[in-house]
Amino acid sequence: MQKISKPAGSIIDQYSFVSDNIPITITISKKEGSFVPFYEVSIASLSENTERILDKIKAELTSEVSLGMVDILTVKDTGLIESKFAEAIVNLISKHFPQEDAKTIAFLKSYLIKKSLGLGNIEILLDDNDLEEIAINSAGEPAWVYHRKYGWLLTNIQVKSEDQIRHYASMIGRRIGRQISILEPLMDAHLPTGDRVNATLEPISIHGNTITLRKFTAKPLTITDFLNSKTISPGAAALIWLGVQYELSTLISGGTATGKTSMLNVVSNFFPPNQRIISIEDTREIQLPKFLHWVSLITRLPNPEGKGEVSMLDLLVNSLRMRPDRIIVGEIRRKREAEVLFEAIHTGHSVYATVHANDTLETINRLINPPIEIPKSLLPAISMIVVQYRNRRTGLRRTFQVAEILPDSSFNVLMQLDIRKDALLQVAKSKTLLNSIEIFTGFTKNELNRSLQDKEAVLRWMVKQKIDTVDTVGRVMAEYYTNQDSLMKAVRGNKTLTM
């Protein structure tokens, strides 16, 4: 890898983190005449002279130890790297830097390993929790990153050759038994950490080989994070919570990168602790509290001979034999999956799933037309639709609509985002959602309104108390379902709850 020169311009932001004992500083700046900001990676305490010496050590290391096509993704797990390379690396570093202390040697060792093996400096980008996406378009241009706050940025990290990009893609593919070659130039895969990888080889990608990594969220977003960022209002969150509490099936819809899976995670925050949950995904993204009765299933692609595939339909059918109370489905794409999902609802299971659509009307049209094409009469099995939206100009994600499906398969939008005011406003009263809960629970409207008020109070209290991890939010929910009086006493007194 090499770095491109730092552009002159104004600094927008600067922050630091540690990547494998290596202190990293990120500077985001605006270069005069450039249309996008610049993302510069700086390795603290590493001069050009030191880097030249490390390049020399790397060459010596290559001659002493056969690196070949070493897969760092495997050796990191097995500890092989310590036994096979660490001793040689430390000896060479000590030889060239005899005066350095143990801490500096550990830093130089980590840097050499990162540079010599695996994904090189791309691994530094993987360790930045503020990045969502990393894109290598070819060896001819620097990598791009998608920053949570600043959107797409051009970096000073560049892969040295097309062969190197192809090697990275092959290495990732081998990890999961996939191949990428001239005959099979497209690959979808995922790292053990859950990060999703797509790779293409030239000449399919005209300008060069590509790798696109979508990072798995290190800290899953919770309802508290959504409220803090104004993604959703406390009133809308309380209504969704009420629906989840009483096992009303819900669809999360939205366009690409609008936060559908994040909202699915947030909705799952509201599950009670005494029910069995089965999640079904293509790649592992759902994260629930550790103490829940939860089984996570993921699909498997066929091997190069076309055998061994486990599809989402296979898992969905199988999940019905596992006595689930709640079923989470990553995304509905095909007719048979939708038919089984709606059958699951009709046999008494609560289902939560995502679908690509930009609003409630489009969601319904997507469901009743090809390729999904379920009978319109089945739609009322879904009680609620939550639509996510992303403002492509600002990058902000918001809940766009909360709607209910009526018995005649039409819909009623209860809450709608006012984009000018940046506020999720109530635009209609419920015609069926609250009535359904009344019928099946015996509660009155006043009791349900009090429940909504209590839920909203709990949500606001969690924000004040900074309860924002999957496990801590899950424990508050468990407390609500099993010891509500004690929780509400803490909420009304704005006190910390002992759990």
Image: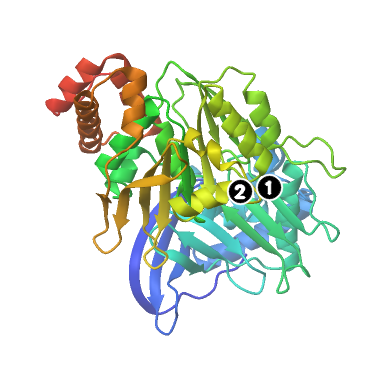
Task: State which quadrant residue 408 falls in.
Answer: top left
Point 46% across, 24% down: residue:
290
Point 78% across, 41% down: residue:
177
Residue at mark 1: 189
Q: Is residue 127 visible?
A: no
The mark found on residue 140 in the picture is none
**Does 43 sit above or below residue 425?**
below
Q: Is 408 placed left or right of 446 in the picture?
A: right
**Type of the residue with mark 1:** Ala
Residue at mark 2: 196
Q: Position of residue 126 (x, y in %)?
A: 53, 51
Sequence-earlier tag: 2 or 1: 1
**Does 293 sit above or below residue 49?**
above
**Type of the residue with mark 2:** Arg
Task: Check disc 2 and report its element: helix, strand or loop.
Answer: strand
Q: Foreground: 53 or 429?
A: 429
Considering the image in quadrants, where does the C terminus appear?
Answer: top left
Q: Is residue 313 visible?
A: yes
Point 84% across, 61% down: residue:
182
Task: State which quadrant residue 63 falls in.
Answer: bottom right
Q: Foreground: 237 or 287?
A: 237
Q: How would you rate the neighbour count of disc 2 (Cα within 10 Å): few for under 14, some for 14-19, many for 20 or more?
A: some
**Does 137 sit above or below residue 107?**
below
Task: State which quadrant residue 376 falls in.
Answer: top right
Q: Position of residue 27 (x, y in %)?
A: 40, 65
Render colour scheme: rainbow
Q: Is 159 placed left or right of 449 in the picture?
A: right
Are circles 2 and 1 on residues that touch, CB within 8 Å? yes
Q: How would you rate the neighbour count of disc 1 (Cα within 10 Å): few for under 14, some for 14-19, many for 20 or more?
A: many
Task: Check disc 1 and report its element: helix, strand or loop.
Answer: strand
Q: Position of residue 461 (x, y in %)?
A: 21, 33
